[in-house]
């Protein structure tokens, strides 16, 4: 139940983010979730898109450095402490969260959080054993 995410290395200068979103839009690619981490010189834009391979190809064709990684989409109870219950279960199993960011839509009464783990399969096993709902990529791409 892993989700494919693309990561794009971008210079931290005016217009680069607009250029990427324009390229993807013109290619008919829908951005479902995103996270941007930056420093003074560069940034890493992480995207969940509806067509991963097409997005990689069009961005690489325009000179961007793009990679694909696997992440996990987890439904989080949309209530105080909801995220904490998931993080506590992962902590009990010594599973490290490398980063996480929110998904753009709710799933029923729950929020959706995208996680990147240092040990993805172990994290999935922990989450499943603790009855957390993990969303398949196909469902996420079409929400």
Image (cartoon, rainbow, N blue to C red):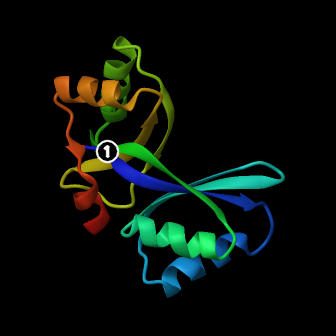
Q: What is the x, y in percent for residue 64?
A: 67, 66
Residue at x 36%, y 34% (from the top left corner): 83
Q: What is the x, y in percent for residue 132?
A: 21, 34
Label 1: which residue?
A: 2
For label 1, the SS is: loop
In the picture, measured across the screen, residue 44 lies left or right of residue 112, that is: right
Picture quarter containing residue 36?
Answer: bottom right
In the picture, measured across the screen, residue 53 lies left or right of residue 133, that is: right
5 up-or-down from 19: above or below: above
* Quadrant where the image shows the N terminus: top left
In the picture, measured across the screen, residue 89 lies left or right of residue 109, that is: right
Q: What is the x, y in percent for residue 90?
A: 36, 21
Picture quarter containing residue 104?
Answer: bottom left
Category of crowding for the residue at label 1, using alpha-carbon neighbours closer than 10 angstroms: few (below 14), some (14–19), many (at least 20): some
Residue at x 39%, y 55% (from the top left corner): 103
Q: Is residue 130 visible?
A: no
Residue at x 18%, y 23% (from the top left corner): 129
Residue at x 41%, y 74% (from the top left corner): 30
* Quadrant where the image shows the C terminus: bottom left
Q: What is the x, y in percent for residue 58?
A: 55, 76
Total of numbered circles in the picture? 1
Q: Is residue 7 visible?
A: yes
In the picture, measured across the screen, residue 108 lies left or right of residue 42, that is: left
73 up-or-down from 24: above or below: above
């Amino acid at each position: 139940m892993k989700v494919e995410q693309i990561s794009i290395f971008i210079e931290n200068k005016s217009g680069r983010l607009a250029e990427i979103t324009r390229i993807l839009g013109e290619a008919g690619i829908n951005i479902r979730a995103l996270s941007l981490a930056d420093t003074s010189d560069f940034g890493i834009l992480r995207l969940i898109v509806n067509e991963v391979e097409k997005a990689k190809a069009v961005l690489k064709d325009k000179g961007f450095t793009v990679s694909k990684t696997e992440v996990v989409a987890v439904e989080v109870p949309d209530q105080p402490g909801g995220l904490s219950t998931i993080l506590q279960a992962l902590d009990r199993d010594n599973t490290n969260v490398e980063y996480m960011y929110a998904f753009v839509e709710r799933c029923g009464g729950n929020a959706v959080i995208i996680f990147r783990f240092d040990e993805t399969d172990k994290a999935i096993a922990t989450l499943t054993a603790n009855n957390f709902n993990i969303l398949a990529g196909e469902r996420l791409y079409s929400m």
